[in-house]
Structure formats: structure tokens, C-alpha cells
Image: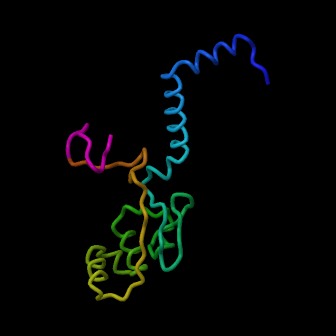
Amino acid sequence: MRLSPLNQRRWRNFRANTRARWSLWIFSVLFVLSLFAEFIANERPLVVQYRGDLYFPVINFHPETDFGGEFATEAVFRDAEVQCLVETGGHQDCLDAPRATRDSADAGEIDTEPGWMIWPPIPYSYSTVNDIGRAAPTPPDSDHLL
């Protein structure tokens, strides 16, 4: 494939411009990162291990009933009840007193099959409502980098 003389000149000018080349590289890296945005910033965990099975909520829909909950709607993994259900293997006391049940499971008072969750680096999606406890905008901190 041959370029016209005009396009050859344009290509030479582009290659001679260092700032243009760096801009192209930076744009390319940001574009590739944006393709994996769901794995970088999301309010759902990347992987959940529950009773020996692996679930991938970032890719598939998983109702709360899959983890021992009551509702057939999508599990809200930020809720204390759902986190307790995953960590205790679906113990039913999580629906009434999740903190006490988790403490009992940690102390070994309840026989459980513990599970775990791996969260993305940024635990918020673009639509997550987050109570920051003060007036917005706030300065950057460990939870809110931007």
C-alpha cells in the first residue's frame, strides 16, 4: 500500500513531532484501559467464592438467592447481609444480625464454610451513590482518588 506524496509528507511531519508521538501513545494506553473499565471500577466483586463454587458477578447476573438470601433480584454485594451470607456460607442469622453473625463466625462459635470476595481496585461504578460524610467536592483520599 503506497501513500500519496501528501500523506507521506504528513506522516514524516507526524514522526518528527515528539509531542504528537507521546500523545498517541498516551491516548492508546488510555483507550486500552477503558476497554477493561468494568474490571477496574465497579461496585460488584470480580470473583466470589461461595461454598466451594466460584461466581463472577462482574460478568454474570447472580441473584441474592444464589448466596442464601431471600430475594430473586441481583445481589447487592455492598450490603452487610450479602457480605455476611458469602463469608459464612449462607448462614440464615445473617439476614437478622449480620455483624453479630460475622463476629460469631470469626470467633469459631458457628460452624461455617467461609467464602471470600475479590473487589476491583476502585470499588465504585459511575452510578454508585456514595455518602462521603461531608460537602462535595472533597479533596482526594484513599477511597476517592480523583
Q: Specify whether residue 9 is painted magenta.
A: no
Q: Specify whether residue 141 is painted magenta.
A: yes
Residue range of the region highlighted in magenta in the rendering: 134-146
Q: Is residue 141 above or below residue 90?
A: above
Q: Residue at x 42, y 60 (%)?
A: 119
Label the magenta part by its dominant secondary structure: loop
In the orientation shown, which residue stands out farthest toward the top? 6
Spot occupied by residue 72 in the image (x, y as percentages of width and height): 51, 67
Q: Is residue 112 above or below residue 66?
A: below
- Which quarter of the image is occupied by the C terminus? top left
Q: Nearer the viewer, residue 63 or 8?
A: 8
Q: Is residue 4 above or below residue 73?
A: above
* Residue 39 located left or right of residue 108: right
- Which quarter of the image is occupied by the N terminus? top right
Q: Nearer the viewer, residue 100 or 24?
A: 24
Q: Nearer the viewer, residue 47 or 136?
A: 47
Spot occupied by residue 87 in the image (x, y as percentages of width and height): 38, 75
Spot occupied by residue 31 in the image (x, y as percentages of width and height): 54, 37
Q: Residue at x 36, y 73 (%)?
A: 84
In the orientation shown, which residue stands out farthest toward the left? 134
| Rendering quarter of residue 112 | bottom left
Spot occupied by residue 94 in the image (x, y as percentages of width and height): 34, 76
Q: Residue at x 39, y 49 (%)?
A: 128
